[in-house]
Amino acid sequence: MFLDIKDLEIRPLDFEEEFQAGVIDFADGTRQRTPLKSSGRAELVEEHHGKHQIVKDIRLRGQLSTRLELQCARCLEPVWQDVKREFELLYRPLGADAGRDELSVTDAEAEIGYYQGDGLLLEDVLREQVLLALPLKVTCREDCKGLCPQCGKNLNQEQCSCSREIDDPRWAALKDVRSRLEH
Ligand SMILES: [Zn+2]
Ligand SMILES: [Zn+2]
């Protein structure tokens, strides 16, 4: 859904949208499991810079919710994550701040972004907001044992018979160095 600055010049836009999985492309390993619902309002905010310049900002307020499937950072099993977020954002035209020392931000509370050309794609905004809401790493449970580094078995599900002492030729050189340091 394109938020066109020319439409917003006429009137604010109230939106209520639902995006099916696949419409918005999230990061690798992140899958959308329920429709992403978002509602809110977009409006134009005019900033007067001096006597002659008017900067047209887009203010966007709203909320979103969806459910995502992520991967456990340790065992790679799927982890479901509900995402709910409210946002209040201000988008300024790209380049409007060029050469200015001070931002005359109308609303200090709002996060600031930039738009290019005639407006802003709502999908891009939502994608960014979802990614900001996600934790950097998720684990399926606090004590997830992860995968065996040797055979790759999921140690939450089964024990493997690999020895914990790693006898990899790549480690042999290191061991050698260590024993020389110790003696
Ligand atoms: Zn796990
Ligand atoms: Zn193993």
Image (cartoon, helix red, strand yellow):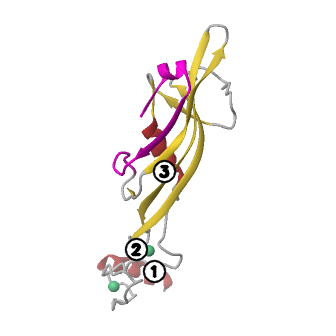
Q: Residue at x 34, y 80 (%)?
A: 172
How packed mark 1 is, by other alpha carbons closer than 10 Å (few <14, some 14-19, many 20 or more), is some
Spatial CA span between label 2 and label 1: 7 Å
Q: Mark 3 points at which residue?
A: 131
Q: Is residue 147 above or below residue 135?
A: below
Three-letter amino acid code at the position of disc 1: Lys
Task: State the residue in front, 161 or 142.
Answer: 142
Please give left or right for residue 91 compared with residue 69 in the image. right
Q: Is residue 111 visible?
A: yes
Q: Residue at x 36, y 51 (%)?
A: 21
Q: Which residue is drawn at 54% across and 19% down?
A: 9
Residue 60 screen position, x and y as percent: 57, 34
Asked whether mark 1 lies closer than 8 Å to ligand 1, one says yes
Residue 120 screen position, x and y as percent: 46, 30
Question: For numbered disc 3, what is the local secondary structure?
Answer: helix
Q: Are marks 2 and 3 in contact (CB under 8 Å)?
A: no
Three-letter amino acid code at the position of disc 3: Leu
Q: Which label was assigned to residue 145? A: 1
Q: Name the residue under label 2.
A: 75
Asked whether mark 3 lies closer than 8 Å to ligand 1, one says no
Task: Give the extent of the magenta segment.
Answer: 1-26
Q: Which residue is drawn at 39% across and 52% down?
A: 27
